[in-house]
Image (tube, rainbow, N blue to C red):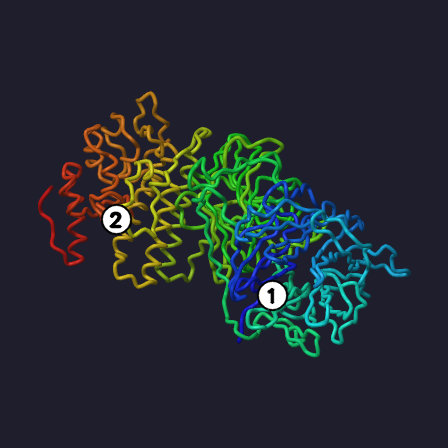
Amino acid sequence: MSYNNPIIPGFNPDPSIIRVDKDFFLVTSTFEYFPGVPIYHSQDLIQWKLIGHALTRPSQLQIHTPEPGGGVWATTIRYHKGVYYIIAASFQRYRPQQDDRVWPQGFYVKTTDIWNEKTWSDPIYFDQVGFDQDLFWDDDGTVYLSSTYRKIQPTIGAKLKDFAIHICSVDLVTGNSTSVPKMIRESSSGVAEGSHIFKRGRYWYLFTAEGGTESGHSEWVNRSEVGPLGPWELGPNNPLWRNGVEDEVQNTGHADLVEDTKGQWWAVVLGVRPSRKGDTWEDSVLGRETFLVPLEWKDDWPVINGGQKISLNSHGPGLYEFDTPVSWRDEFSDPQMQVGWYRKNTPFVNDYSLTERPNYLRLHGGPYNLSVPASPTMFLRKQTHLVCRWETRLSFQPTVGETEAGTVVWLNYFTYSSIGIRKDSKGRFIRFRPSEGDIVERRLDTETAVTLTVDCGSEYRFGYLEGIESEIHWIGSVSNSAATAAPPVGANFTGMMLGLYAFGERQRCLTPADFAMTETSKIDHLISIPDVTSDDTEQVTDNWSGLSDPTERRRRQNRINQRAYRKRKRLSSTKDIHPKSLNVVPSARSTFTVQSQDRSSQDKPKLNFCRSPESLQNILERFAKSAFESYARGDPTADHLMTLTKVNVFRAFAHNLRLIGWSEYWMEDDAISPFNTALPHSHSVPGNNSLIPTNLQPTRIQKSIHHHPWLDFFPLPKMRDNLIEAGDDWDDEQLCHDIMGFWGESTMDAGLLVWGEPWDVRNWEVTEPFLKKWQWVVRGCPELMNATNSWRARRGEKLIFRYI
């Protein structure tokens, strides 16, 4: 049967595997990242789930300022008499360019409950140095520790690393060795590492990774009839297979073995998937990944993958094809971080919260920027697919110029590319810092949340959206070769990470950075984008010659209109804006959940939930997802038209307020419309009301009576006046619910419908239930009734002649 490799994509090198009953468990290396040692689970060797990590506490792992490639190297997982063991070693100094290494003392942690990552013990350290350590329990109960370190006596006349396999017996209670270490394997390549010892029948087997983890990587085997100390007999077909520099999978090796419940043996190995670029191979941005191959025994020697090269499409008994999903999303709705987020190094302090602002990840940026070897305020996830989109939505209102928050494509502190929000005397701006090339900055037009986007593929492309904009502003790109450039010290043993960050320059960031969601989504390929290197952010190709497609012409005209509007807004601004922090916090109870089928259980939210642009954007996305999923399911109860109408009302609400020029103030419960220029607590009015469409121009009532700015979005002057003049004699929360149609028991339909540009009343329609309940609100608005009957006539529905 055919299956797909790698089985665990993304940065997951040095796999080690065990089986306990029907459950397979696999661990990989984490190097300079915390928590350490991810634990994956599967019952069929094809679909794997990350269930936790072994090193989650500072008492277990202290990594501070290691060079790239330092930290926790190849780990081994073993199971013996009801106890799970993970063996590891952590490099605190790794500078191969100067042949400068501090050989680490290895250690192990253990648990009887692998499903609960909190149960792993604190480390028991060995008194032997080395890396790639392995434990083996012999039949007589003796425990042997094998590890890799440099030979005591170097090879004469050769410039080799002289990394060799050494073994000794150990006392697991103390970690102390009980015999003198013995070298049992060295390689002509100068590198023998990744040792694993097994017992099968009358033979002991020693598997080693040799030649280094780059293009010379390979797997070798020896066996002994005496015991783990040897003597060892070299296998007849070494290396066991060999992938070359022209193959689709390269650098393969570092094998560990497992036998399934049917007696079939398997090996897990590391490998890389470079990308073909012309006549050459480009280094994989994903790093070293985990591959699976079948193993057979012939004449008591292992034959891995039939001795053939490892490929992306492989064959083995009882398996099946499965593609690891690209899509993933974190809405930060849990009190703990989702499993799979990592920190660079062991953090000193708690600099984040998931509860201060529910449904947000709040980062309190520390004093280290991303170029400092120490641990910055940064959360990272592994990039698992070459082609994908990474996106996050950020609320950040910096008060000083030495702070920044954003998203990052991260390899190490020498090689990373970031896009974030900063501030200067003129307001907020986007700052794109590529790993190679010049920094690019673009002024932001609003004070709303910003969606930051990275498209991954043949290169990394960086863009952003303000508020509820639909078209991404692409600001720059970084080639994959630049994104994977080798560091001047250390080594690229990891793969690309995508992350979120906040920092101050040698100072704590006093303004929190709030991330509303983060997701990875599937894209087929990188789309063509305009030249993003121009200093003028508004420069987009507008050559209409030969363009006859009406859809494309409308799209380009809309783009021109949007640019012109933003430019007029900038020109109309006469002074710097110093906005307040955005503090709209929808409670967990009021969050709309598209999966819920029990509408009666949904509590009515506070009105400010309708006012947050981040909440608007979130609900727009949720409803779009809900509509698509119900359509895909063929759900006969799903009313797609109802979903569409609700989304349109939300879009109209946000769009009209943007046209008016309102920003952060209309989100506050005690806000006053800026049209109330004579009131002492009012905020400044946009400098030129002529920019506002006629239907949204303020009336005398709007200018003279104190009211909340959310009422200014209706494109009917008389309707706005009716609401304002009614004062506090009506329930504004109930009106919001009935207009939007999402919550409460009064209606499940939107009370108002929008079928086109929301500033034009001809595109609006009112429902009959809304008219019955809120007749006084629309009294004196015949244009709304004319528009309503026009839309009803188009659908062949009965016209309405009463209420107004």
Residue holding disc 1 = 291
Residue 305: horizontal and vertical position, in percent? 64, 74
Toward the left, the furthest residue is 802
Q: Can residue 486 be seen in this view?
A: yes
Residue holding disc 2 = 754
- Amino acid found under the numbered disc labelled 2: Val
Frontmost residue, 602 versus 617:
602
- Above or below, 698 against 150 in this view is above
Secondary structure at badge 1 equals: strand
User: Is 69 displayed left or right of 798 in the figure?
Assistant: right
Toward the top, the furthest residue is 680
- Which numbered disc flags the more N-terminal residue, 2 or 1? 1
Quadrant location of residue 771?
top left
User: Is 579 displayed left or right of 179 in the figure?
Assistant: left
Residue at image point 24% right, 32% down: 699
Residue 352: horizontal and vertical position, in percent? 52, 38
